């Protein structure tokens, strides 16, 4: 797959590569009798395969990143979930693990401004790992999302904001709170010293606010390589905490250099139109792919995207899910 994209040697050779995982909901909870990697999280075998490719392409350092709900180090959580960390550490490249829910191994957070001023906040503060990598990879899961409609490479970036800063209105390095009240609904302001909302009347409607935060996140931490694990997954939501979630086996692995293009193709493989109007198709509100396209992050029009490997028809696996309620 990497060869069909033109190879990754020129992209990663001699460089530090950050890989944002999707292990939402923690890293220990099985679902319907299957491990999390076969349902709602990226499978560790896919992560290792990527690490192996990056290592062989000459990457100097590979840092696996995620914001979890645990206070233990990320590698401890992954080990409890059955990940073979010895295999990762046997690679030539230095492999590191960082839980970005707080400072982690860093000494201070890195402020990153939105190039166009932002649509929710004008700037965000991030764990150092998202700033000191030369190449950034979003390793996502092919699945639906209750609020965003689909959670793919771009939605995976939503999780780069630290819980310590965006989980509550007071700075708390020990926080494992989610970002619902601040980034989803805007019910609470950020801690003192962090940038306030762009406008005081910024939308508090989740299906408007979440898509815009997604685009903000892609603009402050651009994605150099998007990979979506759709080998085994779920439909109807992002995890077992959503009612009505079902198992799916698309047997797909999707990759691309532009996150909007990659997500558009993945969306089409799920049986949806990536250009669907707000409140239609899989989108209960605004279509974040369309918002990203408006910001010139990439195109979501299938006729403008070069597809290699399988044809779209060969990769089609309809998820047959749409939100019950629309909030637009």
Image (cartoon, rainbow, N blue to C red):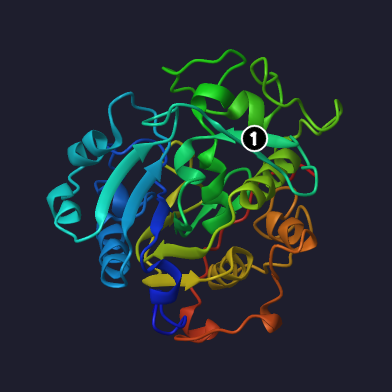
Residue 252: x %, y % from top left: 40, 72
Are there few (<14), some (14-19), or many (20+) residues within 10 Å of tag 1?
A: many
Q: Would you say 148 lies left or right of 227 here?
A: right
Q: Would you say 112 lies left or right of 164 here?
A: right
Which quadrant of the rendered structure holds the C terminus?
top right
Which quadrant of the rendered structure holds the N terminus?
bottom left
User: Going 74% across and 34% down the picture, which residue do you hit?
Assistant: 121
Q: Which residue is mark 1?
A: 124
Compare residues 29 and 105 and report the one nearer the observer.
105
Residue 129: x %, y % from top left: 44, 42
**Measured along the vertical axis of the image, is residue 286 above or below residue 194?**
below
Looking at the image, how many numbered discs can be counted on the residues? Answer: 1
- Tell me the element at label 1: strand
User: Going 75% across and 49% down the picture, which residue do you hit?
Assistant: 115
Compare residues 24 and 219 and report the one nearer the observer.
219
**Measured along the vertical axis of the image, is residue 65 above or below residue 270?**
above
Q: Would you say 13 lies left or right of 30 here?
A: right
């Amino acid at each position: 797959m990497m060869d069909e994209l033109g190879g990754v040697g020129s992209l990663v050779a001699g460089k530090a590569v950050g890989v944002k995982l999707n292990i939402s909901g923690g890293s220990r909870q099985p679902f319907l009798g299957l491990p999390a990697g076969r349902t709602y999280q990226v499978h560790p075998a896919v992560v290792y395969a990527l690490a192996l490719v990056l290592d062989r392409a000459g990457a100097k350092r590979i840092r696996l990143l995620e914001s979890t709900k645990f206070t233990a180090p990320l590698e401890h959580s992954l080990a409890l979930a059955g990940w073979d960390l010895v295999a990762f550490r046997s690679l030539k490249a230095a492999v590191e693990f960082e839980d970005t829910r707080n400072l982690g191994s860093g000494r201070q957070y890195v402020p990153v401004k939105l190039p166009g001023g932002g649509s929710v906040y004008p700037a965000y503060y991030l764990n150092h790992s998202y700033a000191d990598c030369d190449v950034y990879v979003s390793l996502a899961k092919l699945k639906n999302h209750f609020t965003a409609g689909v959670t793919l490479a771009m939605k995976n970036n939503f999780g780069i904001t630290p819980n310590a800063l965006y989980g509550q209105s007071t700075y708390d390095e020990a926080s494992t709170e989610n970002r619902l009240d601040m980034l989803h609904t805007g019910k609470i302001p950020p801690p003192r010293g962090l940038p306030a909302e762009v406008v005081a009347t910024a939308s508090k409607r989740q299906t408007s606010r979440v898509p815009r935060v997604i685009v903000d996140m892609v603009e402050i931490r651009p994605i150099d390589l998007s990979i979506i694990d759709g080998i085994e997954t779920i439909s109807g939501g992002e995890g077992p905490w959503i009612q009505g979630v079902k198992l799916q086996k698309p047997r797909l692995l999707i990759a691309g250099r532009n996150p909007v293009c990659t997500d558009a193709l993945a969306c089409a493989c799920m049986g949806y139109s990536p250009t669907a109007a707000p409140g239609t198709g899989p989108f209960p509100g605004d279509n974040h792919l369309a918002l990203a396209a408006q910001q010139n992050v990439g195109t979501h029009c299938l006729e403008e995207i070069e597809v290699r490997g399988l044809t779209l028809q060969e990769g089609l696996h309809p998820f047959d899910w749409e939100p019950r309620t629309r909030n637009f």
